[in-house]
């Protein structure tokens, strides 16, 4: 049993929560509860260009319907709050400055046009432009590694736009450990100097994410495989700050039923099944996407099905209550390979749960449907 486990689900409110996101939340929840730990919801809304107004409430409603409540989050036990990144801007600014002071990050004044010109120039020679150790101190790029302190200050005072980039260590080999994938090794020379702080005064995902994970005392970062490429930078950032590195677990992708390709938000209704827990109305287009709840699925059947998309208990047993899942869940039985979504299996879970529900419960669930269809008077008889 691990002690003081603190994990977080950190969605960006760019739209409804896809079932892959729900599964990430679920595995975080199961892991936390197994170890008597804390499950946290943090809203990562630093990218204002992709912000969708009704998405945050959707995420909260979806977790509620799924019965995976968070212990800390927006407006809930804000021990290390706020739990919304857009309300933490000043914190990131401070930590970006600390990195610059430590020599682990630098100001870069290159304009988007200048960077495009560099990219085009390299492309004309068949090369890819990467902002890193190869060119950052050559003189063509304008940053605080080549400018004097006075020149940097002058530029900042004059209101020149700048970003803060991470100075990737040169010529090192980074050894990392993933709870699901095992040991991962990478040469730091293959990395680029990612932007940590943008010219609009907002942090990028990378900086905000690790600063918050540190300040919120996160012990295990459990997230989708699509974030695996960010892991080296994140580990290097922890090291640069002299912070303890949390444990990482990157979960397998959920694949389309045919097996090839990630199940995307757009696949949903097209493939004949919902990809969202709850129905979602796109406020801009008015388009409605189906949800498991509105399609009549039971939350416990849906959760049982999701738990098996990427994990198995190692026995024949398939029906698990959330309490049983909490006891059984571990990273050793999470697959590395992607998990194919299977509609027949999803229906099978629903059927299994249907058989265990008693009449009163089913009648109650049918009530709103009957009411809508103006069968009001028959509700009493309906149970029978
Ligand atoms: N905001 C990121 C996302 O959407 C979080 C990734 C992470 O958990 O580090 O999915």
Image (tube, rainbow, N blue to C red):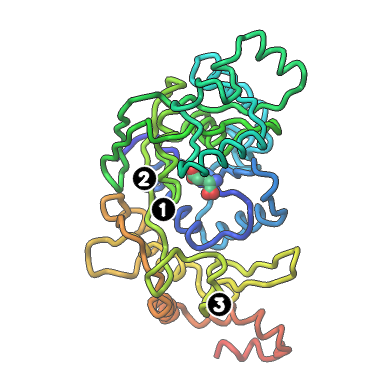
**Circle 1/circle 3 CB separation < 8 Å:** no
Distance from the alpha carbon under mark 1 to that under mark 2 = 10 Å
Which residue sits at x=63%, y=70%?
Answer: 279
Question: Is tag 2's residue or tag 3's residue first in the polypeptide sequence?
Answer: 2
Residue 244 vertical placement versus 82 (above, below): above
Nearest to the observer: residue 365 or residue 109: 109
Residue 249: give its label. 2
Quadrant into which the N terminus falls: top left
Residue 42 position in % (x across, y down): 57, 43
Which residue sits at x=72%, y=53%?
Answer: 53
Q: Is mark 2 on a helix, strand or loop?
A: strand
Q: Quadrant of residue 177?
A: top left
Q: Could you tell whether 5 is left or right of 110 in the image? A: left
Residue on which disc 3 sits: 270
Q: Which of marks 1 and 3 is in front?
A: 3
| Residue density around tag 1, few if under 14, some if 14–19, many if 20 or more, within 10 Å | many
Tally of marks: 3
Q: Is mark 3 on a helix, strand or loop?
A: helix
Quadrant into which the C terminus falls: bottom right
Q: In which quarter of the image is residue 378?
A: bottom right
Residue 74 position in % (x across, y down): 63, 43
Q: Nearer the viewer, mark 2 or mark 3?
A: 3
Residue on which disc 1 sits: 27
Q: Can residue 10 be seen in this view?
A: no
Nearest to the observer: residue 357 or residue 23: 23
């Amino acid at each position: 049993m691990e002690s003081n486990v603190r994990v977080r689900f950190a969605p960006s409110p760019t739209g409804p929560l896809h079932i892959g996101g729900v599964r990430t939340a679920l595995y975080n929840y199961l892991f936390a509860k197994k170890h008597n730990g804390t499950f946290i919801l943090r809203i990562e809304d630093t990218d204002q260009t992709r912000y969708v107004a009704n998405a945050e409430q959707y995420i909260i409603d979806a977790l509620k319907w799924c019965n995976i409540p968070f212990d800390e989050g927006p407006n809930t036990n804000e021990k290390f709050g706020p739990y919304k990144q857009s309300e933490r801007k000043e914190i990131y600014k401070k930590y970006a400055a600390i990195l610059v002071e430590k020599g682990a990050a630098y100001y870069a004044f290159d304009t988007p046009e200048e960077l495009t010109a560099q990219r085009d120039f390299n492309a004309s020679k068949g090369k890819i432009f990467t902002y890193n150790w190869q060119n950052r101190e050559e003189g063509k790029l304008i940053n605080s590694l080549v400018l004097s302190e006075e020149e940097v200050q002058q530029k900042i005072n004059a209101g020149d736009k700048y970003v803060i980039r991470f100075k990737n260590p040169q010529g090192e080999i980074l050894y990392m450990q993933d709870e699901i994938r095992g040991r991962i090794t990478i040469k730091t020379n293959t990395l680029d100097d990612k932007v940590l702080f943008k010219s609009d005064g907002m942090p990028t995902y990378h900086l905000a994410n690790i600063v918050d994970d540190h300040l919120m005392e996160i012990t295990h970062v459990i997230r989708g495989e699509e974030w695996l490429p960010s892991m080296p930078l994140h580990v290097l950032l922890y090291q640069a700050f002299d912070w303890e590195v949390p444990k990482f677990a990157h979960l397998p992708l959920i694949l389309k039923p045919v097996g090839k390709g990630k199940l995307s938000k757009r696949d949903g209704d097209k493939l004949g099944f919902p990809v969202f827990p709850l129905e979602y109305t796109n406020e801009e287009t008015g388009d409605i996407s189906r949800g498991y709840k509105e399609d009549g699925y039971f939350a416990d059947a849906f959760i049982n099905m999701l738990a098996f998309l990427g994990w198995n208990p190692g026995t024949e047993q398939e029906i698990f209550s959330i309490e049983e899942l909490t006891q059984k869940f571990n990273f050793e039985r999470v697959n590395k390979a992607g998990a194919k979504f299977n509609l027949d299996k999803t229906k099978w879970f629903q059927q299994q749960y249907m058989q265990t529900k008693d009449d009163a419960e089913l009648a109650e669930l049918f009530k709103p449907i009957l009411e809508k269809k103006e069968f009001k008077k028959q509700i009493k008889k309906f149970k029978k």
